Amino acid sequence: MPEQFSQSIGRIVYGAGQVEFLIGRMLPGGATGESGVRLVEAARKIHHPAVADVVDGYERMLPDRNHLIHGTYQVFEDHIVAWHLRRGGKQLTSHPYSIEVLRSIADSWSNLAEAAHLALHILLDDQGAETTV
């Protein structure tokens, strides 16, 4: 696979993992190692606007994350196709990605990680204010 594709996919994997870890830190009791739909469901129980915004972004970006992380690739000169076998193994889907789209997705994960980091601090500050009042 050409380096430009593998670097972008690596950035997506790293960014998604960072966001998942940070959302997990927001959960009561700390990080659980959950991801995907289970992480969204757990995080929706927090009921804090800063957390909700991050979880909304995470949920919107999950499909591409899943295709790229859980798929296999067919590489072409100007794009890749991520082949993804859906849960249960009964439906194979294909998802084309140009290098520009992969870079954009990677940037989005990086931006969401920054937002998640800020949201975690806001949540912790608000929880600290609640316990000292």
Image (cartoon, rainbow, N blue to C red):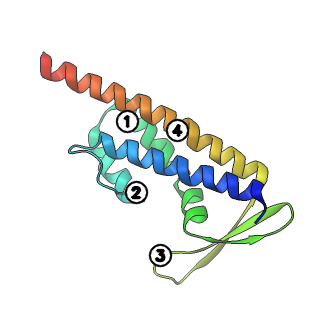
**Residue type at numbered disc 1:** Val
Residue 79 is situated, as x and y percent measured from the top left of the image, at 80, 62
**Few, some or many residues within 10 Å of mark 2 (<14, 14–19, 20+):** some
* Residue farthest toward the bottom in the current orientation of the protein: 90
Residue shown at 59%/64% (left/top)? 67
Residue 36 drawn at (x, y percent): 43, 58
How many angstroms separate mark 2 from mark 4 (CA)? Answer: 15 Å
Quadrant location of the N terminus in the rendered image: bottom right
Residue 35: which disc? 2
**Element at label 2:** loop
> Left of 52 or right of it: where is 130?
left
Residue in the picture at 50% in, 33% down = 114
Q: Position of residue 47 (x, y in %)?
A: 29, 37
Mark found first going from the N terminus, 3 or 1: 1
3D distance between C-alphas at marks 3 and 1: 28 Å
Give the amino acid type for the residue marked by disc 2 in the picture.
Ser
Distance (Cα) linking label 2 and label 1: 15 Å
Q: Which quadrant holds residue 68?
A: bottom right
Which residue is label 1 attached to? 51
Labels 2 and 1: the sequence-earlier one: 2
Q: Which residue is mark 3?
A: 87
Disc 3 versus disc 2: nearer the observer = 2
